[in-house]
Amino acid sequence: MTWVVVLLMSILAIEGGVTEVKATGGDTRLGGEDFDHVVTKFLKDEAIAMGLPDASGDNRILRRLQTAAEQAKRQLSQTQEAQIHIEGLFHVKRDKGTDKVVDFNYTLTRTKFEQLNNVYFVKCLETVQRVLKDAKMKPSEIDDLVLVGGSTRIPKIQQMLQEFFGGKELCRSLNPDEAVAYGAAVQAAILTGARSKAMDNMLLMDVTPLSLGIETTGRVMSVIIPRNTPIPCIKTQTYTTEENFQTEIDVCVYEGERTRTDQNKLLGQFTISGIERAKRGVPKIDVSFALDSNGMLGVSAKDQTTGAEAHIQIQRSGRTSDADIQRMIKDAEKYRKEDEERVKRVEAVNELESLISEARNLILESTDAKKAEQLEKVTEETQVWLEEHAESAKISEIKLKIQRLSNNVSKQIR
């Protein structure tokens, strides 16, 4: 088996003509032009330091500086220095009011270029580390490093990758400027059925870029298909009711990485009716997600006891843009601790609500009037407190209420 890293984008497993995407990621706001912009600003500032006019508001001068910056970047991939010479770039006013045409000359070294763009080089490596983490792999497990995109010619990027992957040689057999277009053309041919002898043994197994799941109690996202799951796939999880004698459930389907559904994207919803009429937590409803290679998502829900069933088909052809995907992933990491704390609160509230329901059942079944009266008093106090503080109480306060009511339930059972 060969593992291939496509710089800043994907980890692939290739075996027997089958290409499986293990993880994918990247920074859609980072590209070759970012290096050009940094050098352009530096050259503009250098011109000012030389006593030349500030070109900040002159688009013509800025365009010429950016063209020179891009050319210098390309040259520095081959040499240690790049001579920048722009004829007649500035028009300087003389004392008598006439203009003097001034050329711009500067020698940009590779070392200076790397210093100016260090923040972007760091971002590149951070993306590689993040994709490896998503794939649950170590650098030593990668067999081949395939560089794609013109900016991978930059020596600093190549050096950082080689060091990060333990001195592994980089694969330079593909033209980095043509590789993406070539791959897109091959995949388009496969998807449209335009097969050829060269593609007879090729199969690409993609992954879902964002997690898919449903909303549960407390507007919590319950993930059924995690991000980076190979597709096509089918996943099933079992859920239950949150109220006594509930006979229908709304199933809301979301896409995203936050544990809060209001921070994710709603894809569709449906209602399953005719579920088992029982106390909360008793019914068992299987929710299945089936995602195919064309982006079609089928979601079904079925009650294990009554056989009641409902489903929805969601066509995800207008899939979330790469920029939005990366934003959602970054937001999930940024708010991870906050979201985890919120989930713990919701779980604590659910536990207390379940305990209140259990206590009320014990009260109805009790043969000891005194114990039942005491338990009912504590249960009602807890219910009133929960209604007033469910959104504001700390987890520790909810846990104390759980402990107190649990102790009283234990006494009733004894």
Image: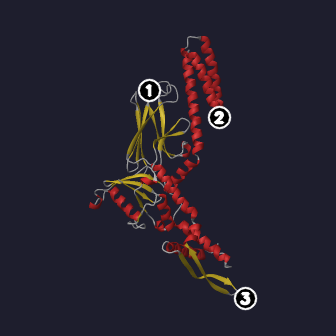
Q: Mark 1 vs mark 3: which is more N-terminal? A: 3
Q: Amino acid at mark 2?
A: Lys
Task: Point out the image quarter for the C terminus.
Answer: top right
Q: Nearer the viewer, mark 1 or mark 3?
A: 3
Residue found at x 51% / y 56%: 127
Label 1 element class: loop
What residue is shown with label 2?
394
Label 1 neighbour load within 10 Å: few <14, some 14-19, many 20+: many
Q: Is residue 27 visible?
A: no
What residue is shown with label 3?
96
Q: Vertical placement of 242 versus 233: above or below? A: above
Question: Residue 184 location in percent, x, y?
Answer: 39, 61
Disc number placed over residue 276 in the picture, else none = 1
Question: Residue at the front extreme?
Answer: 167
Q: Nearer the viewer, mark 1 or mark 2?
A: 2
**Does residue 36 appear left or right of residue 295 in this picture?**
right
